[in-house]
Amino acid sequence: MALNTTNKYGRITISDEAVAMIASQAAGDCYGVVELVSRRLSDNISRLFNRQIYGKGIKVLTAENIIYIDIFVVLKLGVSVEAVKESLISTVKYTVERFTGMRVKEIKVNVVGLRV
């Protein structure tokens, strides 16, 4: 699916992949995040061939121009997991809403592991 909107300049369509790239970049910049972990086999295969994976660790679902995001992340050992999760949610929500102009209804943060 994709996000669609219309303004005085015409119709704008934003793909789920574009939203995932923006969310991935915002999540990767948060303090305490070591790595975003992909949950797709195709991303793991691409990693073997040293290809750049855009939107890694992010799953985006759009329904009626409302965005739902799942984030799969490895956190730094010793940080407050709840504080980092709250920071991730607020940062990704603000960034995606600002980029798309659409509402983010839900963000789920899945902590896959901890790393030094």
Image (tube, rainbow, N blue to C red):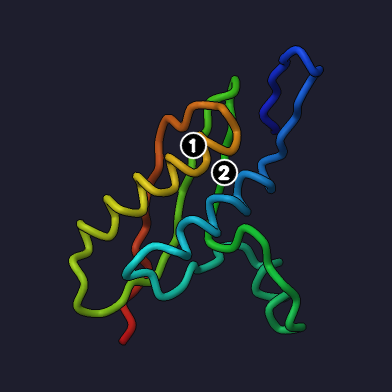
Residue with the mark numbered 1: 68
- The answer to which image quadrant residue 39 occupies is bottom right
Circle 1 SS class: strand
Q: Secondary structure at mark 2?
A: strand
Q: Are marks 2 and 1 in contact (CB under 8 Å)?
A: yes
Q: Residue furthest front?
A: 8
What is the quadrant of residue 60 in the picture?
top right
Quadrant for the C terminus in the image: bottom left
* Mark 2 neighbour density, 10 Å: few (under 14) some (14–19) many (20 or more): many
Please, which residue is most extreme toward the top here? Answer: 8
On residue 60, which mark appears? 2
- Residue 65 drawn above or below residue 61: above
Q: Amino acid at mark 1?
A: Tyr
Q: Residue at x 38, y 69 (%)?
A: 33
Quadrant in which the N terminus is drawn: top right
Q: At label 2, which amino acid type do we have?
A: Val
- Up the image or down, 21 lies above or below 47; here it is above
Number of residues whose C-alpha sits closer than 10 Å to that of mark 1, classed few (under 14), some (14–19) or many (20 or more) = some
Where, by quadrant of the figure, is residue 58 drawn?
Answer: bottom right
Q: Nearer the viewer, residue 74 or 41?
A: 74
Q: Residue at x 62, y 62 (%)?
A: 40
Residue placed at 19% from the left, 78% from the top? 78
| Above-or-below relation of 109 to 40 | above
Q: Is residue 82 left or right of residue 111?
A: left
Name the spot of residue 82 as percent of width and height, x first.
20, 57
**Extreme residue in the right direction:** 10
